[in-house]
Amino acid sequence: MFAPVATRAIARFRISAGRLIVVAALLVIVAGCVTNGTTRDGGAPVPSWHSVGVQQAWLRIDGAIAASQRSTPDGHEQRIVLENETLVPAENRIDLRTSRRRGTARTVVEIEQVADRAASFFGPIRSDRLQQESTVFGPLFYVEAAPMGGVTCVFAFQRLSPGAGSLPSSARPIVMAGQNCVPGMDARAALAPFMSPSVRPGAVVLDAVS
């Protein structure tokens, strides 16, 4: 009379054990996806940002309050965070990235390279929407947006070529791209951090972009 009971107990044990094995296997798979910072499809580790002092930024930029940098297989990047006096839930920042390509930033490839750095409220970043200003480093391209009343935002980008402005001729080109939101309706006020950057004396530009 105890045989059926024992059989049912063994069956329940086998089912529980099977579930544990499945759960354990899933955990191993998930762990394998995130170990060492690899991407879900098993790609290369994603480089992480680390904080540096603003005084270590390659460029002096008005309104900078923090800076970080990282190295990638394609070069080096710095991210400079700017003050934000608006309620727009997007970070005011400028990204600097070394580049091996020549020419100005106004090419389809360049737009595609920087467009994913723009907040969604800017809409698609296309060449037919670009406005242009001139700086000591050459042409600066940008688009405007007004994500809320009384606020003006710009997404701007530019190629800083060696020998232009204060960038040493021995340095690699640097692509500058970022967004800035300010109170009011003055796009030039939002563009101010992009209009007059200067290479910081003693910055590790030559080593960082070599």
Image: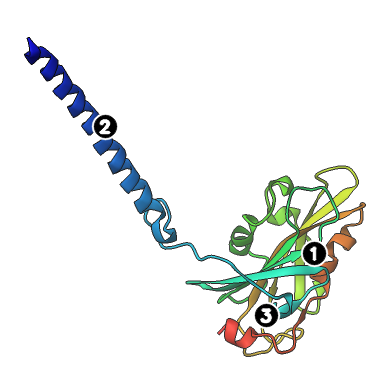
Q: Position of residue 111 (x, y in %)?
A: 64, 60
Between discs 3 and 2, the one toward the N terminus: 2
Let me know if residue 78 appears in the view: no
Element type at mark 2: helix
Where residue 191 sits, quadrant-wise, is bottom right
**Between residues 10 and 113, which one lies in front from this camera angle?**
10
Which mark is in front, 1 or 3? 3
Q: Residues within 10 Å of mark 2 (few under 14, many from 20)?
A: few
Q: Residues within 10 Å of mark 3 (few under 14, many from 20)?
A: many
Between discs 2 and 1, the one toward the N terminus: 2
Q: Which residue is mark 1?
A: 132
- Mark 2: which amino acid? Arg
Q: Which residue is mark 2?
A: 19
Q: What numbered label is drawn on residue 161?
A: 3
Element type at mark 1: strand
Q: Say if 73 sits above or below 143 in the image.
A: below
Number of numbered labels in the structure image: 3
Q: Is residue 86 left or right of residue 107?
A: right
Distance between mark 1 and mark 3 Cα atoms: 17 Å
Residue under the point 73% across and 62% down: 93
Which mark is in front, 3 or 2? 2
- Mark 3: which amino acid? Ser
Where residue 19 sits, quadrant-wise, is top left
Distance between mark 2 and mark 1 Cα atoms: 62 Å
Residue under the point 79% across and 76% down: 197
**Between residues 12 and 19, which one lies in front from this camera angle?**
12
Distance between mark 3 and mark 2 Cα atoms: 60 Å
